[in-house]
Image (cartoon, helix red, strand yellow):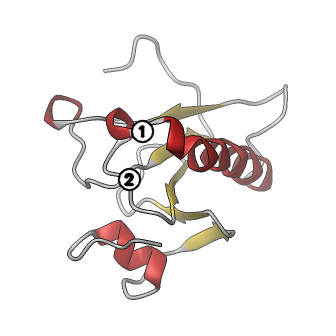
Amino acid sequence: MSPVDGCLFCGIVAGDVPADIVRSDERTVAFRDVSPQAPVHVLIVPRRHIEHAGAVGPEDAGEVTALLVAARAVADAEGIGGKDRGYRLVCNVGPDALNSVPHLHMHLLGGRTFDWPPG
């Protein structure tokens, strides 16, 4: 799984750091954000450490697909999926986007209406 020492999300994936896990499969782990920005705010991470979305290459296609499949499953389970509802998926890259944990992760946000453009 190639964990990185000191990586918070690698610690959650390994079970060494507590988190409110909402979904887990062979490629991804999804858990509630500790500082939610919407009624539903779940982080979805690949089990394999990838630094961020800007570091994704062709060899990571399986993990990226797994993140999107997991996001849909979590959205459906949380009641925000389907054509009558909606959710936002966000990947932050680098300091200008306030990416605070250097492990690829996707924010799944929903349960309210969002403005555009985002802040």
Name the residue that disc number 2 marks.
Answer: 50
Instruction: Give the amino acid at mark 1.
Output: Val
For the residues labelled 2 and 1, the Cα–Cα distance comes to 7 Å
Mark 1 nearby-residue class (10 Å; few <14, some 14–19, many ≥20): some
Judge left or right: residue 102 versus residue 72.
left
Residue 59 at x, y = what percent? 52, 43
Q: Are marks 2 and 1 in contact (CB under 8 Å)?
A: yes
Q: Residue at x 63, y 68 (%)?
A: 22
111 relative to 11, above or below? above
Question: Looking at the image, which residue is at 39% across and 49% down?
Answer: 104
64 left or right of 79 in image: left
Q: Is residue 36 above or below residue 88?
A: below
Q: Residue furthest bottom?
A: 16
Which residue sits at x=36%, y=73%?
3
Image coordinates for residue 37, horizontal then vertical, percent: 41, 44
Residue lying farthest to the top in this orientation: 117
Q: Nearer the viewer, residue 83 or 101?
A: 101
Give me the disc on residue 56: 1
Q: Earlier in the sequence, mark 2 or mark 1?
A: 2
- Residue 52: x and y in percent read 34, 44
